[in-house]
Image: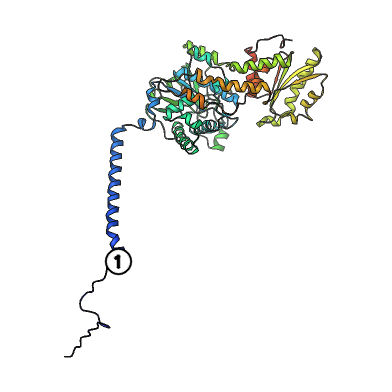
Amino acid sequence: MNSIINLSGRGQRSPWPSRRKPSTRSLLLFPSLILTLVVFLCYYYSVSRYALTARNSTPSAATLRCSHSILSTGERFLWYAPHSGFSNQLSELSNAALIAGILNRTLVVPPVLDHHAVALGSCPKFRVLSSTEIRAAVWDHALELMRSGRYVSMADIMDISSLVSSSLIRTVDFRAFASLFCGLSMEDACSSSNSMTQAALLNSLKQCGSFLSGADGNVNKCLYAVEEDCRNTVWIYQKEDEDGKLDVFQPDEQLRKKKKISYIRTRRDVYKTLGPGTEAESAAVIAFGSLFTSPYKGSQLLIDITGAPVDRSIQSLIEKIEFLPFVPEIVRAGKEYVEKTIKAPFLCAQLRLLDGQFKNHWKSTFIGLKEKIESLRQKGSLPIHVFVMTDLPQSNWTGNYLGELVQDIRSYKVHFLKAEDDLTVKTSREISVAGHSLESGRVPYVFDGVDKLRKNCSPKDLPDVLLYIEEVVCSCASLGFVGTAGSTIAERIEGMRKYDSCPHSSSTSS
């Protein structure tokens, strides 16, 4: 035989296929594929079932995004976004009350915002935050005030009880409204001892605020976010011949070209635009942006409603909101300071020296005060009592006219309040305990958390009430008032003096 069989098998390939032992990887591969397939089928089934359930149970965006609590109240609300300093916020509260009365909506009363925590921008220069942006900023700041224990309602400072008791408007505290609108526990956001729980709740509330701001647009029967602002609209009421016409103030050609502005300001009747028969009317909540207005170039920047000849109740509301007093605790404190500390006829000087444009006008601010004091020196006996309210710390009075007044003790007796004074601290505590906003505001029957809000969301830090007491004191100054030109605080004090908010006593009469 020519072929030789190698029994050892070495060096030659067998004609028959060898049977190798399977690897561990091969053994595990098949079960893994089976497991992956099972997981995928389960996931697909669950997602499909969820989508089908959502389709069947959620027929509209309203039930998706609007809490059942707010819809079940049967009420219609008006929310707005205040901003800037306290005097501006007070002006917006009055404007919001007026529009809520016209539209027959429950006014959501906001907190007192930190000074300039939210800024609008310049209406005359057509450079402002959009309504959506400013609503989101105000909502976020309100949450921060609650989280930090510094929440104080505008209704805790301003006495709006006469508006509510006379049924001119209805109000609800922002905290109660937010709980209803978001379907979340606002009191837990104020008090939760678990930081993770509180953080999660605040995050949910922030998302709710984004929805309320109009970031996702309007939702039928739930939300109508008003996008009109001072760049394109002047709200009017019962002026048939003006509705739809151009306002007298428009951006000039230079501004149009420089800023590429295309805005046209139109006068629009707020009732016809947002009242019965309109898209906005059916929404549970109408959300405005800024409601600040002021005179400018023969017009108003946003709201020009000075009378309601056909509607007597609105005419009465217009007259009432022209002057809103402080709550009794603040009024009592101011009068107590006048009667127990000053105890004599006095002059009030409101000197705004550090904020904004005012820091560049010290000379003109002091000139008016000097002239008034010199006229008093020529008329009456010395010393002349002067109450000073200013943003300039007393440590910086040296070297200016205030320092001169303090040093001349024969001619002048200078009075001023401080945040740490007993009277100020006592009044702060009284405001914290009183809780006027939750007491006077309307609480829909579906909301049962008022007691919890009062317990958990009252300010943990004493509110700053110094400015308000100072304004009351100045309203009682029988020797006159000298205010800083252009200051809204000065305008507020002039209004208080006009309405005789401090009946003269023996200590304030000359």
Out of 114 and 254, give the one closest to the viewer.
114
> Is 154 displayed left or right of 42 in the figure?
right
Q: Is residue 9 above or below residue 461?
A: below
Image-based side of 379 in relation to 505, left or right: right
Residue 205, image x and y in percent? 46, 33
Q: Quadrant of the N terminus?
A: bottom left
Instruction: Say if 21 sits above or below 315 in the image.
Output: below
**Foreground residue among 60 and 180:** 180
Using residue 173 as the reference point, say whether residue 400 is left or right of it.
Answer: right
Residue found at the very far right of the displayed protein: 410
Q: Which residue is mark 1?
A: 23
Residue 308 in view of the camera: no
* Above or below 462: residue 238: above
Q: Please state the horizontal and vertical placement of residue 394, each as a whole percent of the image.
A: 74, 28
Determine which quarter of the picture holds residue 61. top left
SS at circle 1: loop
